[in-house]
Image: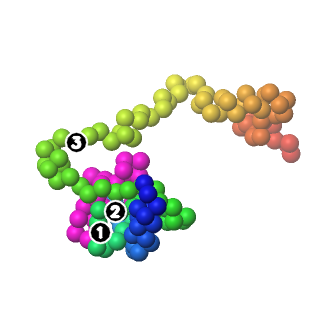
Amino acid sequence: MSAANDSADSLRRAFRIEVTRTQRLSDGTVGLDGRRFEVPSQFGHVERLQLRYARWDLSCVDLVDPRSGAVLGPLYPLDKTANASGERRVRANASVTAPALPRQGEMAPLLKKLLTDFAATGLPPPYLSDDAEDPES
């Protein structure tokens, strides 16, 4: 990219407004000036999105971190013809399974790890069990 294109792009990005929009969690889109934009799947859990765009140029819409102002990624217009086919892609986080629950009477894995760590230090665990004697009796 040449220096002229760089400066033109930075100038184009300088005159943009920042707005907050609510994401439709059902399909992962957000509305902006009468058009729908797809939100990247890694931000599918975020309800309120901060967007930066130029009103006259909806081809360049960016998702922005509200705390730091850093650009997180671009948003692309919803492809209505591809969306009309009825085929839906699987969202990336939909295939994540819940961790297996411990069996009846078995100790939870994190608690087992914490007790092992305390046993390695030689110190007693930082809790009193129910069957410990009351010091005042």
Q: In terms of secondary structure, where does tag 1 sit?
A: strand
Q: Residues within 10 Å of mark 1 (few under 14, many from 20)?
A: few
Q: Element under label 2? A: strand
Q: Disc 2 vs disc 1: Cβ atoms closer than 8 Å?
A: yes
- Residue 10: x and y in percent read 45, 66
Amino acid type of the residue tagged 3 in the rendering: Arg
- The disc at residue 92 is none
Residue at 80 percent across and 27 percent down: it is 120
Q: Position of residue 7 (x, y in %)?
A: 45, 66
In this rendering, does residue 13 appear at all? no
The residues bearing labels 1 and 3 have C-alpha atoms spaced at a distance of 28 Å
Q: Mark 2 or 3, which is nearer the eye?
A: 2
Q: Position of residue 93 (x, y in %)?
A: 39, 41
Q: Which residues are magenta?
A: 26-50
In the image, which disc is placed on residue 88? 3
Asked if 40 appears above or below 36 in the picture, the reply is above
Q: Is residue 126 visible?
A: yes
Are there few (<14), some (14-19), or many (20+) residues within 10 Å of tag 2? some
Q: Residue at x 38, y 56 (%)?
A: 74
Q: Quadrant of residue 109?
A: top right
For badge 2, the amino acid type reads Cys
Q: Kindly identify which residue carries mark 1.
A: 57
Image position of 127 (left or right of 83): right
